[in-house]
Amino acid sequence: MNEELLNAWLRLSIAINTDCFISDMTYNESLICNLLYRNRSYGEGRKLTATDLCDKTNMLKSQMNRTLNEMEKKHLIRRERSTQDKRQVFISLDMAQIEIYERQHRKILSLIDTLLDRVGREKGNDILKLFNEIADTALEVLK
């Protein structure tokens, strides 16, 4: 069963990570934008650093820095040095370019709506509970 679950997981990841859904930015850029967007919208207003983003995504620092540099060139993010601790650099979305992320996010949500319509909306809550349980368990086991 573990091979079958892994295969299903990978097939879903590959299906979502295609050019028709993730075309305006790379997968990692989209992931970082989502974290910054959610932090801005639902977070406690805490400013995030590259280290915070590495912790949340499990990206290597070199990969994170490379991705953040590309995002900065595209004006997707801004970096702001802390006035209290000059070693800290806060990362935030560049709201002038937020439409790029929001357009891609809408595409992915549209795919999810289509999937839920096909498998049945009543299964949506069960799927959500299972995904959250699996994610929580994985985080627990990996600590």
Image (cartoon, rainbow, N blue to C red):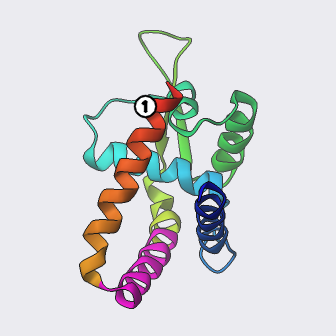
At 75% from the left and 31% from the top, the residue drawn is 62
User: Going by the picture, which residue comes out furthest to the bottom?
Assistant: 118
At 49% from the left and 78% from the top, the residue drawn is 107
Q: Is residue 75 left or right of residue 39?
A: right
Compared to residue 49, the image places residue 85 above or below, namely above
- Tally the marks: 1
At 50% from the left and 52% from the top, the residue drawn is 33
Main SS of residues in magenta = helix
Is 107 one of the magenta-colored residues?
yes
Is 110 one of the magenta-colored residues?
yes
Compared to residue 90, the image places residue 109 above or below, namely below
| SS state under label 1 | helix
x, y percent for residue 67? 69, 44
Residue closest to the eye, 105 or 5: 5
> Tag 1: residue type?
Glu
Compared to residue 128, the image places residue 119 above or below, namely below
At 42% from the left and 77% from the top, the residue drawn is 112
x, y percent for residue 71? 64, 49
Magenta-colored span: 104-120
Residue closest to the eye, 4 or 125: 4
Residue closest to the eye, 29 or 96: 29
Q: Give the residue number, with chain letter if any, for mark 1.
A: 140
Q: Quadrant of the N terminus?
A: bottom right
Residue closest to the eye, 49 or 89: 49
Q: Is residue 119 left or right of residue 4?
A: left
Q: Is residue 121 left or right of residue 33?
A: left
Q: Residues within 10 Å of mark 1 (few under 14, many from 20)?
A: few
x, y percent for residue 46? 33, 29
x, y percent for residue 91? 50, 35
